[in-house]
Image: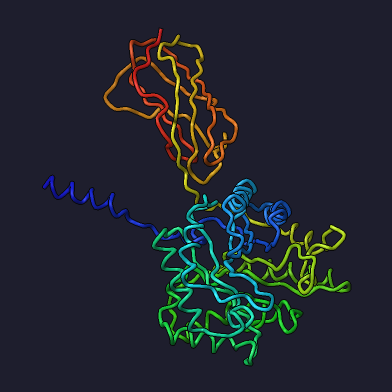
């Protein structure tokens, strides 16, 4: 029997069980997000999506093959962590001057290796595979639903084989694209994807939608169906028609109205209605990310919320003032105590300080308000001592940093010896033992 148990334990360590990425709707969630192209805009995103009651909103950004720099992107993720923003990263190939190159299958391993090298902000690592492949310019000058299906599936499989923390999203599609040389009707594109690979959408964790208010990005905020701000509903219905049964939470990673000098106030009101009366009332919507915070060149300046003089259009303030919710994404809490000191000989009725150096190896920033040293109960030991611990103090400790933690220990009565085990806890999870042994009171 013991041999069987040892073998089971051996295989558990050799082949650890993988846990799936969690459903972001299973925890408190703030749907407000914003798209950016410059990492330097992240502070303005925080002041937008986490304002007026909100916390842990979303930020979306694009990365190309040439931009895979660990130092740059770890800094971006660390900035998101400090500002309580959940990053969604869209993967792109390289622009050849006319088209985006067809992504290479043999490049996927390099992508996975790069993403594995980063310390992500939350357990879920949100990745979008490609962009509007029903446009020829997004796929090397041609349109191939079959090739995109292969790419999406292989990318997802390799990501999941590395870590099930990856939360894979399909490329958003242009719902308004007609059939022609340069674009393909989304219905036909999806049909051909499913025909080539019937279970293709089992390889995504959420549905990514570009739900723009058309026609001409100027449609009514109250319209429904395809080519509207509720276009994701039409997409889900069409997936059901194609016999896609997987329940997919919704990520609207592009939306918004085209702006001109005369309609900025009107757009602000349309956006306010869309968030308050449509998107926030749909229990399947995880995030809504308008396009785009700051884009100073054509052809997308007309979507930019930021003016060329550095000020923001009224859209920014209107969205900022909308009442929001506090999100609470799951973060990995891990670390250890490197060095600890506590004098076990104490005078009853007096406070004594203990201290230790702890290292954070997880994802969350350890904050004093979330951490405590606790005297863990031990059965079978009697003593006159009454041990109380208070005032756990330290400066915030970021991932892969160390910090000095000081706490106060007080014993009320004298006693020859009480067995004690003091543990350091962050957000209710034990990090490590601080002290284990007898405490003697005089």
In the image, what residue occupies the spot 64% across and 62% down?
61
Residue 96: horizontal and vertical position, in percent? Answer: 65, 74
Is residue 294 shown above or below 234?
Answer: above
Is residue 315 shown above or below 13?
Answer: below
Residue 423: horizontal and vertical position, in percent? Answer: 42, 30
In the image, what residue occupies the spot 74% across and 57% down?
320
User: In terms of depth relative to the viewer, which is nearer, 274 or 118?
Assistant: 118
| Image quadrant where residue 69 sits | bottom right
Please, which colouring scheme is shown? rainbow
Is residue 298 shown above or below 365?
Answer: below
In the image, what residue occupies the spot 41% across and 59% down?
162
Q: Residue furthest left?
A: 1
- From the viewer's perspective, is 4 left or right of 222? left
User: In terms of depth relative to the viewer, which is nearer, 154 or 232?
Assistant: 154
| Image quadrant where residue 268 sits | bottom right
| Image quadrant where residue 261 sits | bottom right
Quadrant of the image containing the C terminus: top left
- From the viewer's perspective, is 180 left or right of 292? left
User: In terms of depth relative to the viewer, which is nearer, 30 or 97?
Assistant: 97
Residue 267: horizontal and vertical position, in percent? Answer: 79, 71
Residue 253: horizontal and vertical position, in percent? Answer: 62, 69
Is residue 384 shown above or below 209?
Answer: above
């Amino acid at each position: 029997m013991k041999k069987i148990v040892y073998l089971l334990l051996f295989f558990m360590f050799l082949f650890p069980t993988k846990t799936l990425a969690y459903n972001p709707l299973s925890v408190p969630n703030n749907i407000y997000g914003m798209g950016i192209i410059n990492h330097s805009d992240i502070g303005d995103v925080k002041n937008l999506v986490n304002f007026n009651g909100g916390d842990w909103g979303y930020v979306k950004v694009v990365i190309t093959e040439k931009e895979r720099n660990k130092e740059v992107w770890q800094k971006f993720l660390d900035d998101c962590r400090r500002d309580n923003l959940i990053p969604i990263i869209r993967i792109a190939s390289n622009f050849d001057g006319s088209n985006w190159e067809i992504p290479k299958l043999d490049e996927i391993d390099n992508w996975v290796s790069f993403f594995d090298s980063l310390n992500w902000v939350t357990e879920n690592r949100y990745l979008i595979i490609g962009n509007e492949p029903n446009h020829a310019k997004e796929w090397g000058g041609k349109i191939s639903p079959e090739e995109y299906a292969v790419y999406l599936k292989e990318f997802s499989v390799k990501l999941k084989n590395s870590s099930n923390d990856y939360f894979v999203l399909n490329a958003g599609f242009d719902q308004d694209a007609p059939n022609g040389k340069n674009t393909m009707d989304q219905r036909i594109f999806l049909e051909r994807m499913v025909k080539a690979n019937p279970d293709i959408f089992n390889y995504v964790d959420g549905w990514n939608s570009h739900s723009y208010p058309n026609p001409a990005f100027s449609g009514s905020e109250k319209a429904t169906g395809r080519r509207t701000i509720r276009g994701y509903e039409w997409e889900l219905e069409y997936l059901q028609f194609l016999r896609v049964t997987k329940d997919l939470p919704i990520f609207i990673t592009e939306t918004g109205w085209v702006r001109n000098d005369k309609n900025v106030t009107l757009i602000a009101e349309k956006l306010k209605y869309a968030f308050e009366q449509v998107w926030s009332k749909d229990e399947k919507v995880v995030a809504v990310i308008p396009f785009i915070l700051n884009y100073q060149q054509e052809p997308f300046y007309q979507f930019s919320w930021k003016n060329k003089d550095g000020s923001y259009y009224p859209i920014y303030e209107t969205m900022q003032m909308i009442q929001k919710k506090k999100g609470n994404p799951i973060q990995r809490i891990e670390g250890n105590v490197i060095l600890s000191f506590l004098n076990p000989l104490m005078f009853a009725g007096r406070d004594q300080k203990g201290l230790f150096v702890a290292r954070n190896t997880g994802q969350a920033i350890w904050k004093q308000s979330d951490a405590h040293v606790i005297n863990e109960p031990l059965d079978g030991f009697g003593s006159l001592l009454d041990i109380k611990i208070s005032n756990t103090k330290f400066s915030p400790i970021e991932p892969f940093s160390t910090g000095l933690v000081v706490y106060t220990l007080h014993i009320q009565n004298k006693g020859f010896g009480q067995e004690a085990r003091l543990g350091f806890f962050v957000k209710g999870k034990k990090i490590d033992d601080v002290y284990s042994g007898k405490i003697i009171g005089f």
